[in-house]
Amino acid sequence: MAAVMFEDLSGTATPVSKSDNPYQPLLDSANDDPLQIQARYTTHRTTRTALQKSKILDPSFSEWTVDPILAKLDGPNKDPAFKDERNCIVFWARPPQHIRDMIRDIQEELRNVAPDMWFMPLQNLHITVLEVIFSVTEPEVNQIVSALLKDGAAENIANITLRYRPRLVKPMISYDAAAMALSFVPAAGEGSKSVDEDKYTYHHLRRDVYDKVVAAGVKPASRYAVPSAHLTIGRFINQNGFTLDGPDGTAFDREKAKKVIDKVEEINDRLQKRFWPTEAGVPKGGEWTIGEEKGLDFRKGTLWYGGGETVVLGKGH
């Protein structure tokens, strides 16, 4: 798997929490205030993107961080004999149609500057509310799934969005040297809602799903709990289109890499103008209420790239 840093870059020291839940400290430090929670998510994504932009445009940058496993599963270097053995368990939220449409248009634009990039199929798009376990064997997965199905625990979790409906707003492309994602921040009183109506944020949802999994007798082994709400939309699986033949051999084409960054910034500028909240409200298509169309998707299997199989799918609202 391509190396990715999962560092909290939200800029505020997170206090030590008495809770074992990794999502609780941020809520404590933000005083459960949606405005402060949104600020933490905003700072994290803007700081991370700025760091990645600086890294990619630096003269020492020499190649995209290719995902070697995905490169064997899809694309020009596909190996039909290769099988991904990394089994996982997750609770995903599926984007509604208007978010899928937004991503489809973004992917088409990115394809013009990175034609050999791997793009997440629209039907596979997801945001990870909780990663329960990753990269284990199939028997281990089935044992944990059985525990979560007991007494209807997984069904209750998958349907949590019938009770709580956290909103996400301010879509923006976030990126690093390995992948691109459409990211959001938790809502905080935008549009027709008050800050109080947005009191239950996406971060609260992540915390509560974690607690419910623990209550079912399973301790999640997530890779990260950083303040990010993102759907991966594309990954680099080769250097095609970004190499130059020179006297010293093949070199990385930084001008083409810069065109990718320029295109991302162009799209982000348009997303902000078209979909971000204004004093007039939230433009149509600019927000996502978790649980629209479908509840949470309790899923298992080889699902790193949107695959796997659904065990329980929650009801939409």
Image: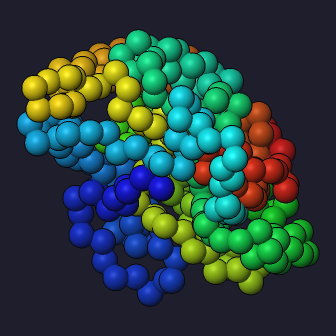
Q: Kindly indicate the quadrant of the structure image that contains residue 110.
A: top left
216 shown above or below 194: below
Q: Kindly indicate the quadrant of the structure image that contains residue 254.
A: top left
Q: Give the x, y percent position of residue 93.
A: 66, 46
User: Which residue is farthest right?
Assistant: 151
Looking at the image, which residue is at 57% across and 74% down?
Answer: 221
Q: Give the x, y percent position of residue 149.
A: 87, 70
Residue 307 visible to the viewer: yes
In the displayed structure, does residue 295 sit left or right of residue 45? right
Q: Give the x, y percent position of residue 234.
A: 49, 33
The C terminus, quarter of image:
top right
15 shown above or below 69: below
Q: Nearer the viewer, residue 88 or 193?
A: 88
User: Which residue is farthest bottom?
Assistant: 18
Q: Nearer the viewer, residue 242 or 228?
A: 242
Q: How is the rendered protein coloured?
A: rainbow
Q: Give the x, y percent position of residue 262.
A: 24, 20
In the displayed structure, does residue 104 sit left or right of residue 88? left
Looking at the image, which residue is at 62% across and 41% down?
Answer: 79
Picture mark count? 0
Looking at the image, which residue is at 75% across and 50% down?
Answer: 308
126 shown above or below 170: below
In the displayed structure, does residue 208 sit left or right of residue 51? right
Q: Nearer the viewer, residue 272 or 132?
A: 132
Looking at the image, which residue is at 75% across and 59% down?
Answer: 300
Residue 192 visible to the viewer: no
